[in-house]
Amino acid sequence: MVNRFGMLLGFLLLVNALLAQSFPQFYYYQGQPYYLDYRPDQIHIRFESGFDINNRDTFLSQKLGTLLKSQRPTVSGWDILVELNDWLDGPQMAQLVQSLTAEVEVLVATPVYRHDRVRQIITDEFIVGFRPGVSTQEIEQLNQQYGATVQRVNASGLYYLKAPSGVDAMTMANQYAQEAIVAFAEPNFIYPHGDLLHATVNDPLWSSQWAHRNTGQSVATGASVGPSTVNGSPDADMDVDQAWDITTGDPNIIVAIVDTGTDLDHPDLQANIVGGYDPTENDFVPNDDTEGHGTATSGVVAAVGNNGIGVAGIAYNCKIMPIRIFDDGGSSSDQWIADGINWAWQNGADVLNNSWGGGSPSTAIESAISDAKTQGRGGKGCVILFSSGNDGRDPVNYPAYLTDVIAVGATSMFDEKKNPGSGDQQHWWGGNYGKDLDIVAPTIVYTTDIAGADGYTSGDYNDTFNGTSAACPNAAGVAALVLSVDSNLTANQVQDILQKTADKIEKYAYNSSGWNKHVGYGRVNAYKAVLAAQGQDATHPIVVHTRLQPTSNTAAQVVEATIIDDTGLAGGSLQPKVYYRVNTGSGFGSWQEVIDTDGPSGNVYQFIIPGQSHGTQVEYYIVAHDNSSNQNQVTYPFGANVTGVSGSAATPFTFRVDNFTALSYSGTGPSWGIFGGTATATLTVPDNFVIADLDLKVSGTGNTSSILIGLEAPSGTRAGPFVNTGGSGGWSNTNLDDEATTTLASSSNPFTGDFLPDNALWVFDGENASGTWTLRIYVDGLLNSGEITSWTLSFNSDEVPDQGLPVFLNSFQALVQKDGVLLRWETASEINNQGFEIWRAEDRPENFRLIADYNSDPALQGAGNSSQTNVYEYRDFQVQPGMTYYYKLADVDLNGNRTFHGPLKVKVVGDGVEVLEAGNLPREFKLSPAYPNPFNPETQLRFAIPRNSRSRTEYVRLLVFDTLGRKVKTLYEGQLAPGYYQSRWNGRTDAGRPVASGTYYILLIGEYQRQSQKVTLMK
């Protein structure tokens, strides 16, 4: 016995000596070492079973300090995966895990290993198989020799053993592997957070289905103006891939697609289609028309998964029942709609997806909906979902507002309420919202299209299916997954699960039920919904809080929040907290933690942020955990990533402390004609200051029921403060104010007074106001001419503005010419201006680099202080034909402060344009007659861009087409300031090949106007 303990002591001393230098990086597999790499930025800690896990945060903060980035439980509350702020080399990692293992609270700390993409964690548990014929006594002696304890022995005779405190499983397994009686010994690996299970599919387009799994991948916008792709926010998705670890759908669950029909022969849908109905022709062949709307919604719900082609539906093992209620011309009737809904529930549909709406109420439709809800599924009720509408206004459309249905609004790939200001670039629409909105789901998604030439595209798939039409089937697919887990749930229970497990996105305040009128109960989360369907607690605490406003009060500020959870709230280190940080002018400090030291009054918590001096910006989050075994965490705003809180990055609440200055800037225009479209006006704020609050006031004419107003800051941040509300009568001093109490929906034209905007203006808070602001008017409909007669930006600023921009520009333009790109700008005034810098980027407006400045080029030296007009030019000769370039101009004051203008986009094609000097700027958009015409070998083309263009510069294209409408030559493409210009065409194509004699068309295309003329080449 003495000898055995002596051997054990020697072994442990040897282990400790080795740990001081390194850690094991292989285990024995089939008698050979199997090497594993390790993650230099992660460790794993298993605490002693007697450790109070409510003190976990405090322990980690004390022991790791600034090295701690985040922490998350793995298989139990005592097993913690820790992410580090730094990468550690081998000796540093060994030192860290040894020091943590030495703590009395810790059973063992280890590196996190990896094999390919999968992380593998070792603890103190390992598995041993003994050779045949080995006696129980021999096994017991060996276990006693090494201090291992038996956890269990399975039916195959494998021993699950636990190492002595302080010894990791890989070290112990490797020691056992040396023993003659052991057949194998390996760690009992943990594969954390779905690494091993990561349910994916082999459908090649699935990686682009951001609504399932958003990694920040490039996503098509479908926008005609602006970026063609954007990179969304990671985790702004429905966690569909995690839900697939539980279920991919049950073939017995049927989703009726009540729509335009479905492409019955689509290779990515056909296997999942069951018999449907076409009430428009009273037959059972509900094939899609040429539009493709029903095929697109079908693919979102249940496109076949794991078939090696195309996309995957959310519930890709469920079935689709096509119900065609629109004829070939897109028309429908109450009868067709009611017949379609009735046939669906009477023939086994469990979920009814309705991506349509509008019109006046119909008793026949409502009766069919009521019967489906009360009699469908053998009395359990069908789950009926309707899209909320695409007008972007309050309220939601009919029938979505009916109590028997689920009204589904839309969200962007940035987890924003879809509105004209959201980052998806589709600024012409928004999802309807209001008191009857239930949930929101992603829009602008990848899905199926009618195979072949029909439908939205000429292919079989569409990557920008949009509207609440796309959001609704996303929610319907999740409802199908819920029923796949438990088909005995009633329709009301399914709706309750969808609502309670939704992620509370956006900063709009939620009520005590976890609802607000902008996003309902939140954005659908498939993973949490299927967990709840299994009976697990997948709901998070509800946080009710009204964001703090800018203040001049330097005293402590109280963050008051009502926090509610059905299982109660966690205590100790997981009790509700506020994390805050401050910026006094030199950048933000570290996050600080605040608790309600006096404890809550009922469910009401008060967190005290200490008083701050004037000139301070404060950011804060609220964090809470429930008291369930899962310790479900919520942050408000959703998605915090601060010390001790896991999650993806989100924008915190912010407020400023200072004496505030009121500043206003006014402009006029734009106007628009009877054919609708888009109109734009700009307003320059010449002063430098940080926005604490912003109101927008407008006056003008037009039928406001089909007008969207978008506002864009110099930074590119957008809002959609007024969306399709009211009727004829326009606006009269309509002031849109986040602090107002009257809604637009409750008033009428001309909306005189203060109103809550449709979408908040606080998105601009904290930005610098200096630069050009853009007001965009989107007119959806004909015969609705009008104009904005005046608009005013009213700011509250906590900084006294300086004496204006160092330079105030009249114009800035980039012109392609024969020998390169000419940059030309005109200043109205200059203050303390040292000079200018030229910055350039290729292909896209990012990663700009300095190509010239006033130190190297005397032509770029400024005028110092000047109140007269000055004209500057710079020629960039280092350009390549066919390339697109972006230019920024920076003026630099005497203190070295830069103010940027631009960017301007040009494409180096053709011979470019020349500026023609003239006394007055043109008054009309005009393409003058070509001269000579007929011509050979060259004709001269002059055109004019007027001052009343909708913005300071206009994006212009000068193109040549043949008589069949085929583009022959791009003569110019880029932004131009108001003025007169000249170009030439030499009768050659873009490739430089001569064209044949004949007639050609010259097109001058601006942002809002176009003109054309014929020219004849005679050789």
Image (cartoon, rainbow, N blue to C red):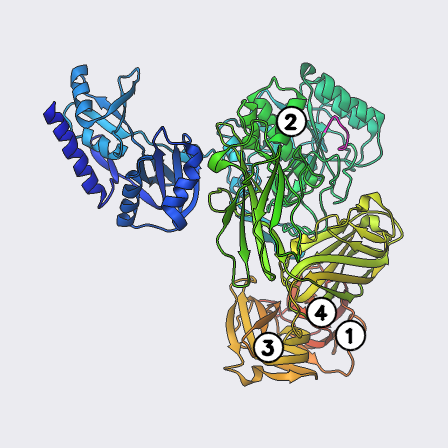
Say if the magenta span includes residue 402. Answer: yes
* Residue plotted at (70% across, 77% down): 982
At label 2, the amino acid type is Asp
**How many angstroms separate mark 2 from mark 1 (CA)?**
68 Å
- In-front residue for pair 405/878: 405
Counting other residues with Cα less than 10 Å from the Cα at mark 3, is it few (<14), some (14-19), or many (20 or more)? some
Residue 249 position, x and y percent, is 55, 26
Mark 3 highlights which residue? Answer: 818
Is 506 drawn above or below residue 481 in the view shown?
below
The residue segment tinted magenta is 400-405
* Residue plotted at (75% across, 33% down): 400
Report helix, strand or loop for mark 1.
Answer: loop
Report helix, strand or loop for mark 3.
Answer: loop
- Taking the image as drawn, is residue 304 in sight? no
Query: From the viewer's perspective, is 634 left or right of 692?
Result: left
> Which sits earlier in the primary sequence, circle 2 or circle 3?
2
Most extreme residue toward the right is 729
The quarter of the image holding the N terminus is top left
Mark 4 highlights which residue? Answer: 952
> How many callouts does the rendering have?
4
Report helix, strand or loop for mark 4.
Answer: loop
Q: Nearer the viewer, mark 1 or mark 4?
A: 4
> Which sits earlier in the primary sequence, circle 3 or circle 4?
3
The quarter of the image holding the C terminus is bottom right
Q: Nearer the viewer, mark 3 or mark 4?
A: 4
Is 286 drawn above or below residue 465 in the view shown?
above
**How many angstroms separate mark 3 from mark 4 (CA)?**
25 Å
Q: Indicate which disc residue 929 carries.
A: 1
> Which sits earlier in the primary sequence, circle 4 or circle 2?
2
Q: Nearer the viewer, mark 4 or mark 2?
A: 2
